[in-house]
Amino acid sequence: MANLVKLNTNENPYPPSPRVVAAIQQAAQHGLQLYPDPDGSTLRQAIARHLDLTPQQVFLGNGSDEVLGHAFFTFFQQGCPLLMPDISYSFYKVYCGLYSIAARTVPLREDLQLNVADYAAPDQAVAGVVIANPNAPTGVGLPLADIETLLQMHPNRVVLIDEAYVDFGGHSAITLIDRYPNLLVVHTLSKSRSLAGLRIGYACGQAHLIEALNRVKNSFNSYPLDRLALAGGVAAFEDQAYFEQTCQAVMSSREGLALALEDLGFVVLPSQTNFVFARHPGHEGADLAAGLRAQGVLVRHFKLARIDAFLRISVGTPEQCDQLVAALANLVTIKA
């Protein structure tokens, strides 16, 4: 079907900064016959400046999925379970399976909020903790005080906070790094910086954690980021005004979309991401997803217990959001 409205993969609806495109074009003119910098020094420096860290506190990878994979291999093979929410990013369990790490899922509350008290356990009984904050696919965020509680609960285990969506209204744990040697924070340029096509992810933590990640990375691939990605990533961090403008545009559209969905009778969870998680009391999630697909609108439906009534809807441009709402209105009014 041509002209699909693609709201199922949480990509940014806006293009990257023009400075990114120019930097990539310039980088393509020279040096592609040579290997890239294995340390990604200029990009690490740009990230460190942006976050008020040192380059020794920044690790680079080919998208945040690779960063997560290396982190699971490096820190969580303790011979005991890794704690994670029962409803969260599906790849956490994939990495556990790959590296023979036992996964202990901790149920979210009935309102799909995370209760940090449920993660209390002796350090020797767990391999660590991994939390997506804001959570995916719910979109709900935790305050920094809760993250600190997790860090204090497990002082001798790595607590990994996956902040793929934090730039859309969440509260980053980056500010806690200097105080907590067990904190690792993972970010991506795929969402808020519109660079899903370049595959750039990074982790931040104290230098001993980053050194360990680099040892593992160099055993797999010394050159995870190519010259074009490194140049584009640096330019993305240099254009702060564009970054703030697009993030604000997405957040503004998100709030308008949530209100429009509520007007149609949907229950919408509070979101700090570039998507909303919503259900309609009178309609099955799978039926709504199929009905939208028939009208050329793609959203994400999860065939999982507790959330099979929900749709995860990426925030598009205002025009795309209008098309989505009109398509949903057709479905819920026809069946009302």
Image (spheres, grey):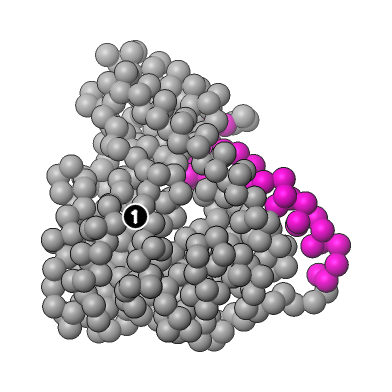
Image coordinates for residue 259, horizontal then vertical, percent: 35, 24
User: Measuring 14% from the left and 44% from the top, which residue is drawn there?
Assistant: 110
Q: Is residue 22 magenta?
A: yes
Looking at the rendering, the stretch of residues picked out in magenta corresponds to 4-32
Looking at the image, residue 326 lies above or below residue 74: above
Image coordinates for residue 28, horizontal then vertical, percent: 81, 61
User: Measuring 31% from the left and 49% from the top, which residue is drawn there?
Assistant: 141
Q: Is residue 44 magenta?
A: no
Foreground residue, 186 or 314? 186
226 vs 6, left or right, is right
Foreground residue, 310 or 256? 256
Query: Could you say which quadrant of the image residue 267 lies in?
Result: top left
Looking at the image, residue 278 lies above or below residue 55: above
Q: Quadrant of the N terminus?
A: top right
User: Measuring 63% from the left and 30% from the top, which residue is drawn there?
Assistant: 2
User: Measuring 51% from the left and 41% from the top, which residue is drawn there?
Assistant: 247
- Disc 1 marks a residue whose amino acid type is Asn
Foreground residue, 132 or 95? 132
One can see residue 181 in this view: yes
Q: Quadrant of the C terminus?
A: top left
Image coordinates for residue 300, horizontal then vertical, percent: 41, 41
Q: Check disc 1 and report the residue beneath it.
A: 133
Query: Could you say which quadrant of the image residue 258 lies in?
Result: top left
Image coordinates for residue 76, horizontal then vertical, percent: 32, 78
